[in-house]
Image: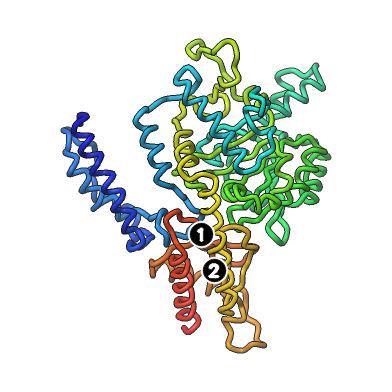
Amino acid sequence: MNIDEFRTKGKQVVDDICDYYQDLDQVPPMSQVKPGYLYKLLPHEAPLEPEPFEQVQKDLQTKIMPGITHWQSGNFFGWYPSSGSFPSMIGDMYSNMLNIVGFNWICSPAVTELETMMTDWLGKLVGLDTRFLSIQEDGSEGMGGGSIQGSASEAIVVAMVAAREKKLAELIEASPEMTADDVDALRPKMVAYLSDQTHSSGQKSANIIGCKAHIVASDGGCRLTGDALRAAVAKDRLCGLVPFFVCGSFGTTNTAAIDDLPGIASVARAFGLWYHVDAAYSGSALACPEFRPLAAGAECADSFNFNTHKWMLISFECSVMWVRDSTHLVNALSIEREYLPRVKGDRTFVKDYRNWGLPLGRRFCALKLWFMMRMYGVSGIQKNIRRHVKDAKWLEDQLLADGRFEIMAPVNFGLVVFRIKPSAITRCPHVSVSECLVNKANVDLVQAIHKDNRVFLVGTVIKGKNVLRAAIGSTLGSHENTELLFEVVQQLTTAILCD
């Protein structure tokens, strides 16, 4: 394909994208194909000769699209949103145009410097403490800073590695006589603390770096508390283990629960733990000042992360992580090679972001943030968050008014967790019903919603109880989509309870 062909075909692709979004709410949101469907449709090896664009485009529509679950649909309420936007998409297009491998400043100065500025813009937008910013108000370099990671899963691995190396450095400084073998012997004894509601990437991160993971039981509200953490740390210390890291959640995956962030901060300070706050979903809400009191205690964190690609109008992938002191991050991840030259002199804007994360090569993701924040503005970002929260509150009210449902977690953001309540299952108000029967009714409701396929949501389990999760956050969605969701839930619940 030459430039002239690309010019023509590229315009066709933009038209296809617009047509897709124009009609998206009319398409069933959930793919209905069976496992292995694509293997039967595609050749089992690459074509020997080039194929025309038109044939590839046709196969996209007839073979690939049937296997797509439509995350951008206004009728998609599953997991958490993947809320892209057209300005973000344009930023991605320009990033693909440049196709830069941005591992240090020399690769393309604008790539590094825009990331520094956009993570500062974003940090200010969500009200982070100035210690997390790269550039201070007087233009000088700060100790902290932000960087773009691929996902919150990457961010927690990076934070955990930095935390481990920081703790080992402290132990070596306290006991200079330690040998390399002594240090190696300590590594398997190091403990990271997570709750039973922490995202699965916490456990995976511990597996990756080879440390122990202490899973602390959450309380009745699915929160990790400072008291439970303190007891766990004290017990492990008595066993000769080395506590070094704790993850607090500002909006858990299961229920959007908010951990006891001030209590966790107190324990982390007392025992010298690295304190990481995972705000993957809910962090976007901090763009609105009214939600910031919910994050009290996060200002004490050593690292803070949220996914702009969940609820802040950025297409996947763009997860931003801030650290209070980047020294520990760079010390843990910096590896110098002769073919990676360093800039001499003033390095205020010369961040080697390859030393702030796992990969060497990095995409120009900051362009997405730049386009989105400029074209939406703070007011547009806030409006988007608030309308989703308003719809979530509306759905909560409708479910309660119906009388057959109960809300299983506080509706602080755009997530509504609910179930058919026990009293709705029995026609006799004074007769109790088994939890197994209640669970079955709610599992049946999820399956019925999937089969109906007008809307899409998922179920989960909270303390042994099967529930439904409706995550409201589609960029192109409207209140009418939430009304449809409630209508479907009502209709299918009636059918299930009548059986």
Q: Is residue 372 left or right of residue 423?
A: left
Residue 143 sits in which quadrant?
Answer: top right
In depth, the one of 158 and 343 nearer the eye is 343
> Which corner quadrant of the image does residue 182 belong to?
top right
Contact (Cβ within 8 Å) of mark 1 with mark 2: yes
Identify the residue under disc 1: 472
Residue at x 81% of width, y 44% of height: 235
Q: Residues within 10 Å of mark 1 (few under 14, many from 20)?
A: many
At 22% from the left and 45% from the top, the residue drawn is 57
| Dot 2: element | helix
The x, y position of residue 402, in whole percent, is 56, 79
Front residue of this view, candidates 290 and 19: 290
Nearest to N terminus: mark 1 or mark 2: 2
Residue marked by disc 2: 395
For badge 2, the amino acid type reads Leu
Q: Is 342 located above or below residue 241 in the figure?
A: above
Residue for point 17% across, 37% down: 51
